[in-house]
């Protein structure tokens, strides 16, 4: 298998875009060449790298989910690090005053729920506002570039886990998404995408020959990325999504659930590409910390037939129906805010209705079809 070359691997072909300019780099621990050399270190040797910009989890991946990222100096290079996951989620005028061009190099997971997409979008807006160039070093979509799944975020339910009307699974690379954001949502910044070499739309992550680096602390494997859209829905509930275990998002549960009954009821649905196994776990942090939880582990049998959003709807309905008294949707963070489940699903329908999973999924796939037609305009690869 021939290894895919990511954007930063092609440094010698695009370094002329950076020579003689003051450069800011938006990156994290996934920003590496295919030989695992950090993009920070690569650029620091070749060009005038003035600043680093840190997304959720920090520039070196050392911050847990949801925790504030602080401004600091990079421990290895001494280059100033500005946070884009604190009081400001977009680069400010002050942060960019000594910058001519912003470079973005991070691995996303192919889900609209992942904040790195919107760190990129906000940074593109700042680049436009303050007349800076913006360059995206492209990387594979771990879920491939063909399948699109799920509903579009409705107006009024946009957030940092769904800033635009995107489906859960969008089937574009991070560079292709930048092109779509720039055109469809009228950012209109000065944008360049440095393409990969050897990537094909059918490829799952292992097909690329590239090593998997955790994009965030709770995304340990490629399987986690594939199942993320199925179980992240529980972040808006009092059900553990497996944070604080060695299998985040692959297991879900709560102290009051019947693991055997839940697994049996879900396996009876014969959902494509998966089996459900009764599972017991005790989270070391997050929901139900140090309490024995009962639930299920999702085992992927076939990634090519897996419909993770369909699984999410059936799983939520099954868990909710097993104990309606103890199951809860989490309240809004603020008085004027919306429920987390509404931001996650891009609508309040799931929370406010006794929904039919198959009927909802069928409707959502009509919305996915709209996006699948739109995204064709932004394909950089066959």
Image: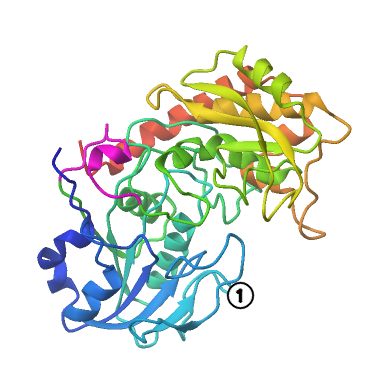
Q: Residue 364, percent across and down?
A: 56, 27
Q: Is residue 127 visible in the rendered structure shown here?
A: yes
Residue toward you, 204 or 217: 217
Q: Quadrant of the N terminus?
A: top left
Q: Is residue 296 magenta?
A: no
Query: Residue shown at 56%/45% (left/top)?
Result: 248
Query: Residue shown at 62%/11% (left/top)?
Result: 268
Res 256 quadrant in image:
top right
Secondary structure, mark 1, is: loop
Q: Residue 334, percent across and down?
A: 78, 60
Q: Residue 250, percent across and down?
A: 55, 37
Q: Is residue 346 visible in the rendered structure shown here?
A: no
Q: Residue 342, percent across and down?
A: 69, 43
Judge left or right: residue 371 versus residue 115: left
Query: Residue shown at 15%/71% (left/top)?
Result: 15
Above or below: residue 49 compared with residue 359: below
Query: Residue shown at 78%/53% (left/top)?
Result: 332
Q: Quadrant of the C terminus?
A: top left
Q: Residues within 10 Å of mark 1 (few under 14, many from 20)?
A: few
Above or below: residue 95 compared with residue 198: below
Residue tagged 1: 87
> How is colour applied across the structure in the image?
rainbow
Residue interval drawn in magenta? 198-212
């Amino acid at each position: 298998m021939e290894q895919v070359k990511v954007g930063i691997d092609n440094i010698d072909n695009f370094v002329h875009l950076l020579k003689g300019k003051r450069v800011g780099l938006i990156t994290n621990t996934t920003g590496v060449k295919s030989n695992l050399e950090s993009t920070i270190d690569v650029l620091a040797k070749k060009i005038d790298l003035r600043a680093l910009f840190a997304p959720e989890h920090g520039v070196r991946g050392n911050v847990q989910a949801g925790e504030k990222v602080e401004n600091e100096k990079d421990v290895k290079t001494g280059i100033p690090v500005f946070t884009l996951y604190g009081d400001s989620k977009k680069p400010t005028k002050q942060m960019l005053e000594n910058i001519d061009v912003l470079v973005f190099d991070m691995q996303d997971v192919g889900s609209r729920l992942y904040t790195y997409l919107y760190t990129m979008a906000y940074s593109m807006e700042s680049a436009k506002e303050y007349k800076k160039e913006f360059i995206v070093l492209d990387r594979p979509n771990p879920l491939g570039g063909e399948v699109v799944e799920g509903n579009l975020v409705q107006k009024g339910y946009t957030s940092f886990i769904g800033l635009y009307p995107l489906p859960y699974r969008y089937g574009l690379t991070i560079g292709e998404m930048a092109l779509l954001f720039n055109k469809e949502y009228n950012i209109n910044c000065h944008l360049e995408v440095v393409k990969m070499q050897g990537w094909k739309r059918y490829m799952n992550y292992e097909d690329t020959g590239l090593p998997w680096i955790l994009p965030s602390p709770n995304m340990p494997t490629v399987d986690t990325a594939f199942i993320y859209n199925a179980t992240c829905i529980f972040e808006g509930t009092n059900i553990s999504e497996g944070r604080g275990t060695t299998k985040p998002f692959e297991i879900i549960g709560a102290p009051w659930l019947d693991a055997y009954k839940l697994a049996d009821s879900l396996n009876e649905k014969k959902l494509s590409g998966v089996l459900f196994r009764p599972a017991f776990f005790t989270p070391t942090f997050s929901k139900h910390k140090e309490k024995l939880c009962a639930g299920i582990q999702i085992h992927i049998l076939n990634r090519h037939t897996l419909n993770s959003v369909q699984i999410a709807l059936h799983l939520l309905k099954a868990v909710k129906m097993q104990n309606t008294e103890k199951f809860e949707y989490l309240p809004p963070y603020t008085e004027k805010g919306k429920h987390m489940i509404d931001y996650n699903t891009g609508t309040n329908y799931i929370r406010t209705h006794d929904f039919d999973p198959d009927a909802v999924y069928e409707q959502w796939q009509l919305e996915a079809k709209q996006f699948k037609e739109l995204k064709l305009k932004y394909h950089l690869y066959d």
